[in-house]
Amino acid sequence: MVSVYTERMRRIVPLVLVGALVVLAGVTSAVSLQQSRALTSAVRMDILCTNKVGVKPSSLVLSCADANSMLKELRWSDWGDATAYATGQITWNDCSPTCVSGHWKAEPVTLWAWRVRDERYTRLTSSDPRRLSTTVLTSYPPS
């Protein structure tokens, strides 16, 4: 009788352990998903050249005085993570011979918003540092 009990236990114990691990993995995944959704909905960004705060802006003005450079058609991914990424177009007026009679140029650009503080991205960096190096995101006018 002892050998039957031992054999039965040898079969049951691994099944119980696997079952417990599956349940634990499910609970952990559910908690992680809930936390990531909460973070995603909470993170905002100060919109450059305005006093507004937004989520996944589709455009941003870079030169506040005359709007002669801007980011357009932005499509964001990983919003709410430590770093959010966007692809789109960077456009600028070459101001040649003057800004009034200048020509608009455009290039593809990749952006990343990062350094979350108080549920806001505080830094914006682009793949084209000639047009946009790392920028501190603050409301306008700065408070």
Image (cartoon, rainbow, N blue to C red):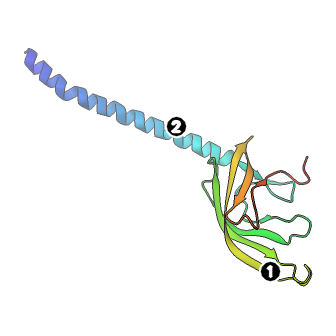
Q: Position of residue 43 (x, y in %)?
A: 70, 47
The residue mark sitting in front, 2 or 1, is: 1
Q: Position of residue 118 (x, y in %)?
A: 75, 40
Q: Position of residue 106 (x, y in %)?
A: 73, 77
Type of amino acid under label 2:
Val
Task: Determine crowd level at label 1: few under 14, some 14-19, many 20+ residues with C-alpha closer than 10 A.
Answer: some
- Which residue is drawn at the image coordinates 64% and 51% (left, top)? 83
Type of amino acid under label 1:
Trp
Q: Return the mark for residue 58.
A: none
Count the numbered circles shown: 2
Tell whether label 1 touches label 2 (CB within 8 Å): no
Quadrant for residue 7, please give it: top left
Say above or below: 128 vs 134. Answer: below
Say above or below: 38 vs 95. Answer: above
- Which residue is drawn at the image coordinates 87% and 79% (left, top)? 95
Left or right placement of residue 85 versus residue 72 in this view: left
Quadrant for residue 98, please give it: bottom right
Residue farthest front in this picture: 130
Which numbered disc flags the more N-terminal residue, 2 or 1? 2
The residue at which mark 1 appears reads as: 104
Left or right placement of residue 26 versus residue 126 in this view: left
For this rendering, which residue is in front, 39 or 101? 101
Name the image quarter holding the N terminus: top left
Kind of element beneath mark 1: strand
The residue at which mark 2 appears reads as: 31
- Which residue is drawn at the image coordinates 64% and 54% (left, top)? 84
Say above or below: 68 vs 125. Answer: below
Q: CA distance from mark 2 to mark 1?
A: 48 Å
Kind of element beneath mark 2: helix
